[in-house]
Amino acid sequence: MRSSNRETVPVGKVVGVHGIKGEIKVLPYGGLDFEWKTVYLKGKGSGSTCRVKRARAHKGAIIIELEGLQTRNDAERLVGLEVEVDRGSLPELPEGEYYYFQLMGMEVVADDGRALGKITNIFSTGSNDVLQAEGPFGEVLIPALEDTIVKVDISNGRLVIHMMEGLLPGEGER
């Protein structure tokens, strides 16, 4: 999505409302600790730009108060929309760390050369993230650990992993 010639990236989804004063509850795609100024809400065939009055972390989500939202009913209309921000508003990450949007859609290849598919989902288990790839072996769940991830090549959209026993569906069942 482009807005005012700026590149925007998805950072979360509106999953509910909070309180009665029009605050929305956003489930972030990964840890997003930055200053929320403007968000772009898209989905349901439309999009809108909203200024953020206040944002705070709350039980694994981000509670956001947007200008113009004053009631719970106003906020409820936004549930299900994707939240995007200007890419330039995100802080640089330390080497070896990536935003979810950078990994989504990447081609996953095992260090033995087997193509495993593309990353279709990323979720956190608390102790580590898990990358979900869909491809010729079906759904493959890859723990995002140093022992598993060999190389992340953002510019070429490729992730190389070390094949651990039991990683492929049906492996080890007999």
Image (cartoon, rainbow, N blue to C red):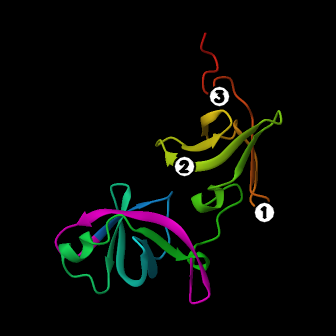
Q: Which of the two discs, 1 and 3, labels the residue nearer the N terminus? A: 1
Q: Name the chief secondary structure element in magenta.
A: strand
Q: Quadrant of the C terminus?
A: top right
Amino acid carrying mark 3 in the image: Leu
Residue 158 vs residue 34, the one in the foreground: 158
- Dot 1, how many residues are within 10 Å of its Cα: few (below 14), some (14-19), or many (20+)? few
Amino acid carrying mark 2 in the image: Ile
Image quadrant of residue 140?
top right
Image quadrant of residue 86?
bottom right
Query: Residue at 65% of width from left, 70% of height from top?
Result: 92
Tell me where the magenta segment starts and ends, as one range: 1-23
Q: Which residue is mark 3?
A: 168
Q: Which residue is mark 2?
A: 122
Taking 54 as reference, is 124 left or right?
right
Taking 154 as reference, is 84 left or right?
left
Q: Quadrant of the N terminus?
A: bottom right
Q: CA distance from mark 1 to mark 2?
A: 19 Å
